[in-house]
Amino acid sequence: KTPNYYYGYKFNKEFLFIKDLKGLYAAERLKNIFKNNDLSEIIEIGGGIGYTCHYLKQMLNTKYTIYDLPYSSILQAIYLMISEGENNVHLDNEKFTNKKKIFLKPYWKIFGQKTKKNILWFNEDSIPEIDFNLSKKYIKKILESKKSFFLSINQEARNVYGKGIKQHTVNDLLKKNNRIYRSRDFMRPGYIEELFSIT
């Protein structure tokens, strides 16, 4: 445990905390799914500070878009511009350029985007925490992308949030769809990793 309440591993003078390990693991999974299925880009819903994107960009040179709350997008912009370079990050409403590979957009713009195919969708640690009706809208948008995949790493604790409302699960939203696998998260008890094929 570190003074700022993060947990991780210390070796020599270095320190890796849980978000580094989570981001590195998720990036490795995304890279393998992307390469094995000839996909065109990655779209993440709720990217946190951008750890997964940061690690993936070191393994794979592809378009990566994050849809999130505006405050989160500010943090992502700072972190990713420092780690990946300002010329590689495109902020919403900037002039479009094909040279930039990381795109940061406010969450509501996902619903107005033209539906594409061959997308690798990704969500970690957020769909159960989002309003149920908004989560359903995200899933509907994801399911419109044919020949695509959706990787979810989320908790299933059904914790109470708001006025006694219990969190939902990804499984509540995608019970009848083409699940390729479902397994426990390798680091965190109560978290489930699932991969869905969208046909």
Image: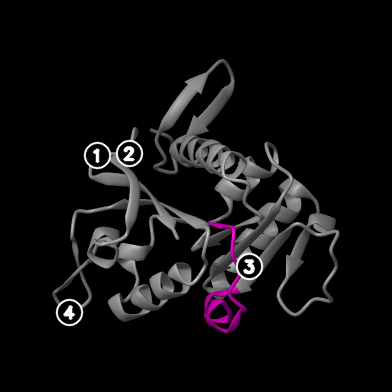
Q: Quadrant of the C terminus?
A: bottom left
Residue that numbered label 1 is attached to: 189
- Going from N to C along the chain, the mark reached first, 2 or 3, is 3
The kind of secondary structure element at disc 2 is loop
Between 99 and 36, the one nearer to me in the picture: 36
Where are the magenta residues, as a range?
A: 106-121
Q: Nearer the viewer, mark 2 or mark 4?
A: 2
Residue that numbered label 4 is attached to: 163
**Residue sitting at 69 percent across and 41 percent down?**
60
The kind of secondary structure element at disc 3 is helix
Above or below 196: residue 193? above
Left-right relation of 83 to 158? right
Q: Amino acid at mark 4?
A: Lys
Q: Amino acid at mark 1?
A: Pro
Outermost residue to the bottom: 112
Residue 43: x %, y % from top left: 57, 60
**Residue sitting at 34 percent across and 34 percent down?**
187
The kind of secondary structure element at disc 1 is loop
Give the numbered dot on residue 185.
2
Residue that numbered label 3 is attached to: 74
**Residue sitting at 24 percent across and 61 percent down?**
175
- Going from N to C along the chain, the mark reached first, 2 or 4, is 4
Between 28 and 179, the one nearer to me in the picture: 179
Q: Nearer the viewer, mark 3 or mark 1?
A: 1
Residue 3: x %, y % from top left: 43, 38
Check if mark 1's residue and mark 4's residue have beta carbons within 8 Å.
no
